[in-house]
Image (spheres, coloured by chain):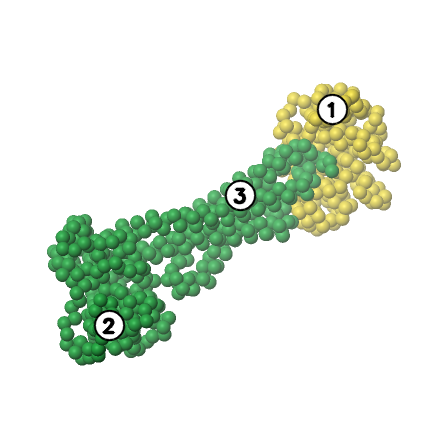
Chain colours: A yellow, B green
Amino acid sequence: MAAPALALRDVTFHWPGRDTFGLRVPDFQLAAGESVLLLGESGSGKSTLLSLICGIVTPDAGEIQIAETRLSGLRAGARDRLRAERIGVIFQQFNLLPYASVSDNILLPLRFAPERRGRSEQGDAARLCSALGLPDDVLQAKAGRLSVGQQQRVAVARALIGQPSLIVADEPTSALDAATQDGFMGLLFDQLAATGSSLLMVSHDERLGARFDRVVRLEDILLRESRAA
Amino acid sequence: MILRLAFASLMARALTVGMTILAIALSVALFLAVEKVRTGAKASFADTISGTDLIVGARSGSVQLLLYSVFRIGNATNNISWQSYRDIAGRDEIDWIVPISLGDSHRQFRVMGTTSGFFEHYRYRGGRMLEIGQGHGLDDLYDAVIGAEVAATLGYDVGDPIIVSHGVASFTHHDDQPFRVAGIVERTGTPVDRTVIVSLEAIEAIHVDWQTGARTPGAPTPVDDIRQMDLTPDAITAALIGMNSRLQIFGLQRWINTYPEEPLLAILPGVALQELWQIVGIAERALIGVSVMVVVTALLGMMAMIFSSLDERRREMAIWRAMGARPVTILGLLVLEAALMAALGAALGMVILYGGLVVAQPWIDAAYGLWLPISVPSARELVVLALVIGAAALASLLPALRAYRLSLADGMMVRT
């Protein structure tokens, strides 16, 4: 069996200097190509979990694995490189550098990921944009001029370029209205099918669940710990 | 791509970035302008006299002698007797000697009595001779040759009468013996432009009826009588000397300085200029210091600008981090932006400086007799620009380090 796209085992983490709050993930896995919706309210530790997965912070104990690479053995620089190579990130909003062109925004992660750059081809950015229903002339436009819906789709294009094995999305639809949300999710899943990337999406919106292979409640995999002060 | 993004980021904050760049540009322009004026003034001074090996005057300070004999600044404390002058002129080492007699004035300009030898031997700006553009040299006793600036300021033409005043800034005039403008010297950029030149005999002639600084009572001696008199002066103010061989300069200098009949002083113009620079050096350094502080102030302003922008750029930093940028990349990005701003500021400063020079050059020349050459930026100027850019990068390290720490703490999630 192929290595999972993502695996967390016995991970514990405390924010330095904040002894009273921590979290523990006994076991969570995401198979290659699988899409999982993590349901959780804000403040339930999902931001911390995403920071752990992306290698921004390191766990106190336990093992995080992206594809076949274990994060725990890596230095900060190598973790940054791994994130650039393997993970496409989509935020809730304000995904893009507003002053840069759409083209530069989409190509930015490739700047830090030589392997991913090798996988991508000339014209990938344009192809992704048209597949995501963005107008043809969007590439040269300033990202800050785009509507929120367009910006989120550009963020998808940026996350998908060079086919990273894992897409991490943090409530990417919450800034969109209901009608746009559905179209957005449709386009996202179409492209996932094309690239074969796994998707880990965090949201508080249960209605999104239908498209996913699996819907997991955050509190089922993540134990919050409150130490006595 | 990073450079393009840094540039786009600056463009997006055009107003604050523009003000910062303008501040840097003005400070750089000021600094370079001070440098220009400094070197220009030095060159202008050094260009004033060339080809003269020794200057002789009554014993005083070498700088003082240089200033009054060549630059017409200040006054001589004493004269050289004609006898001493004859003794020096009789030495074999001497190729030529030109006497100078100062002390009178015309309006705000000094009058200098000399011989036609002055026009033959005086050299400026690397060996150039004086050229009489209009009219002719000193032919008649009451002929005056005026500098270009005298002519321009007072609106004189060849043939106009000139009344010489006794002393400098005085109210007694030698109005009984008017002079006539015989010629106008082409502009030289030296004190000659501001000098009225008459013959040594003329200086003697207008003082015929004077004794110890006051007019003797009674009717003035008629001009026709004066023309018949022996007008050999009793004393002169200074003399310029050219040598047959430069090797003999020091020997003659020693001989003059130890001349037993009268206390005299002989100086080498170049050496006296060096002494002058040493005196001026303090003011020069102060001027440089002030303009350096202005540059530093502009860079501090830039630093403050970057600091205050950090907070609103945390989201941007988080995006960079999420894309896989290391904190060091973010630090580098901020330093790059600062260096870009400084480079733009430096370039704009050069434009301001040279633009200003083109506009102000004729005016500065006319008003201060200071010719600032417009030339390709010197190596020294380029070094200054590089230093400014380097200092900007260095100054930006402080806010950049803060951004580094912020981006380490924030990661991809900005907690607000």
Q: In this view, does B234 lie to the left or right of B181?
A: left
Q: Which amino acid does label 2 sit on?
A: Arg
Position in image of residue B12 (x %, y %)? 65, 49
Report the chain holding disc 3.
B
Q: Are marks 3 and 1 on the same chain?
A: no
To which residue does mark 3 refer?
Answer: B392
What residue is shown at x 45% (from left), y 62% (from top)?
Answer: B360
Dot 2: chain letter: B
Q: What residue sits 29% from the left and 67% below the top? A: B167
Q: Residues within 10 Å of mark 1 (few under 14, many from 20)?
A: few
Query: Which residue type does callout 3 highlight?
Result: Ala
Residue B198 x %, y %: 24, 70
**Mark 3–mark 1 distance (CA, rounded to whole Å):** 41 Å
- According to the picture, the residue beneath numbered tag 2 turns out to be B215
Figure quadrant of residue A4: top right
Towards the viewer: A161 or A194: A161
For discs 2 and 3, the disc positioned in front in the rendered view? 2
Q: Quadrant of residue B134?
A: bottom left
Nearer-the-camera pick, A168 or B247:
B247
Position of B89 with respect to A207 (left or right) is: left
Question: Which percent across, then down, holds residue B271?
Answer: 27, 50
Name the residue tied to disc 1: A19
Answer above or below: position of B353 versus A90: below
- Mark 1 element type: loop
